[in-house]
Image (cartoon, rainbow, N blue to C red):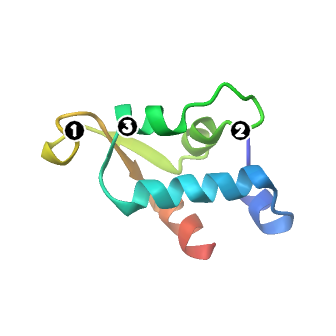
Amino acid sequence: MVHTATLEARPDPAAYLLLQFLAWVADRPRGYTETMEAWRTSCPRLPVWEDATAGHLVRLESGDATTGGDTRVLLTEAGQALLARA
């Protein structure tokens, strides 16, 4: 798991990938299905979704018209703050 302190102390590729994921989520409304198709990985060294959820950087919300009724993936305040600091 990539911790916030890791991003500040010694950036690594996984930390940059996490920031890219957060920016992607922030760009426009994203559904859970789209998110899993775009960011799912079987590589244990790149657990972007797991890091984002474990770090409380994203949250799930009931879907709406912007995601075709699919569950929405949104940044939390912590996710927004981390992205803003980057």
For disc 2, the marked residue is 46
Give the farthest residue toward the front: 38
Q: Is residue 72 above or below residue 15?
A: above
| Residue at screen point 59% across, 65% down | 82
Q: CA distance from mark 1 to mark 2?
A: 27 Å
- Mark 3, other Cα within 10 Å: few <14 / some 14–19 / many ≥20: some
Question: Do residues under tags 1 and 3 come within 8 Å of each other at their CB atoms?
Answer: no
Q: CA distance from mark 2 to mark 3?
A: 18 Å
Query: Residue 14 bears which disc, if any?
Result: none
State which quarter of the image contains the N terminus: top right
**In the shown orientation, is residue 2 left or right of residue 26?**
right
Give the farthest residue toward the top: 42
Q: Secondary structure at mark 2?
A: loop
| Residue at screen point 50% across, 61% down | 23
- What percent of the width, then of the height, locates residue 5? 77, 60
For disc 1, the marked residue is 63
Q: Is residue 41 above or below residue 82?
A: above
- What percent of the width, then of the height, locates residue 26? 41, 60
Q: Nearer the viewer, residue 38 or 25?
A: 38
- Who comes first in sequence, dot 2 or dot 3? 3
- Who comes first in sequence, dot 1 or dot 2? 2
Q: CA distance from mark 1 to mark 3?
A: 12 Å
What's the amino acid at mark 2? Leu
What's the amino acid at mark 1? Gly
State which quarter of the image contains the C terminus: bottom right
- What percent of the width, then of the height, locates residue 76? 44, 55
Residue 3 appears in the figure: no
For disc 3, the marked residue is 34
